[in-house]
Amino acid sequence: MDETLAEFFRRTILKIPMTEMMTILKTWNFLSENQLQTVNFRQRKESIVQDLVLLCEENRASLNDAAHLDIIYTQFHRHQKIWDVFQMSKAPGDDIDLFDMEQFKSSFKKILQRALKNVTVSFRDAEENSVWIRIAWGTQYKKPNQYKPAYVVYYSQTPYAFTSSSRLKSNLPLLGQALTVASKHHQIVKMDLRSRYLDSLKAIVFKQYNQSFETHNCTTSLQEGSLGLNINMDSRIIHENKVEKERVQRVTQEIFGDYPQPRLEFAQYKLETKFKSDLNGGILAEREEPLRCLVKFSSPHLLEALKSLAPAGIADAPLSPLLTCIPNKGKNYFKIRDK
């Protein structure tokens, strides 16, 4: 093992938290149980890493083995990356071809390597007929940078691929071409949907957010005590409040359902509109360029936050369709223009 590869192993293992070290190493399944038992995991982490690197060298580990370890680490920490969604489509009249995962991998890798001399591509099969792809980009004159890879998660026989956001925007067309050709599609477009939570993105595009998330029952009838009402209040006011709260609860459940929402951190709205006024003249009236405004809603769990607004009395029910349509439209970037 040369020094470059040994350093790659060292840095990859070093970033694994000690609480996850054994789990990730066993998932990797490159080092045997007997080899792992020879390592003292109670010593300093730097010493543990050194021992593990020596074992990798003893097993004649390759760059692909190191890439697999990095993929597993990323699968455990997928929320540390921001994921974009790409949607592919077939040409009109195209037949549905039988899908072969090994053929997909071979075709994807060949397309990248033919177009770019210095690139390394590694694959790892995952659950639900998906494959994780790790791409270390180089240039015609520089070797691949193993420390800033791009990741792609593709679910076989679907038109969707999820990619970790990359600074190398110039490689996106090539990546899109490789995905389109290898999966036997005709066209690919980037959706206006992004999040750190890969599982939530998958649930949105596959319309699984009412199935894959744990459900809970919100249909319990509202009791006066649970509404926080004062028992000394006029009975007519109590009745009116109760009816209104039940209406808000019903409308909220109709819109959002009785299941936990997919997790998104923000929704962004760009508004472009011409200035309109009944008054003649004025600087804005003569302006040809539209007025532009950007509004961004942020929350650790935006959809659950929106779902709670009306029941908490912060907003009227129902909320604006621009806020409630996010899962159904599969987007959290919106452009609003004059009709």
Image (tube, rainbow, N blue to C red):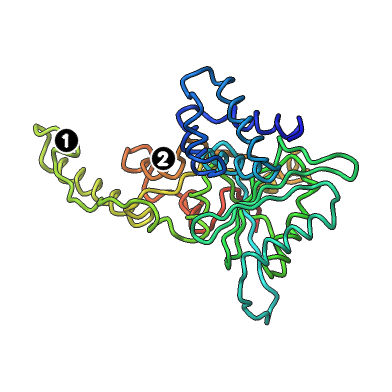
Q: Residues within 10 Å of mark 1 (few under 14, many from 20)?
A: some
Q: Can you tell which mark lies on residue 73?
A: none
In contact (CB < 8 Å): disc 2 and disc 1:
no
Q: Position of residue 220 (x, y in %)?
A: 19, 51
Residue drawn at the location 86% of the way across and 39% of the way down: 142
Q: Find residue 192 and report its horizontal and vertical position in percent.
A: 62, 52
| Left or right, 137 with reference to 92 | right
Nearer to the camera, 35 or 21: 35
Q: Residues within 10 Å of mark 2 (few under 14, many from 20)?
A: few
In front here: 299 or 9? 9
Residue corresponding to mark 2: 305
Question: Is 215 left or right of 103, judged from the image as shown?
Answer: left
Residue at the farthest right position:
141
Which quadrant is home to the C terminus? bottom right
Residue 229: which numbered mark, if any?
1
Quarter assignment of residue 105: bottom right
Number of marks: 2
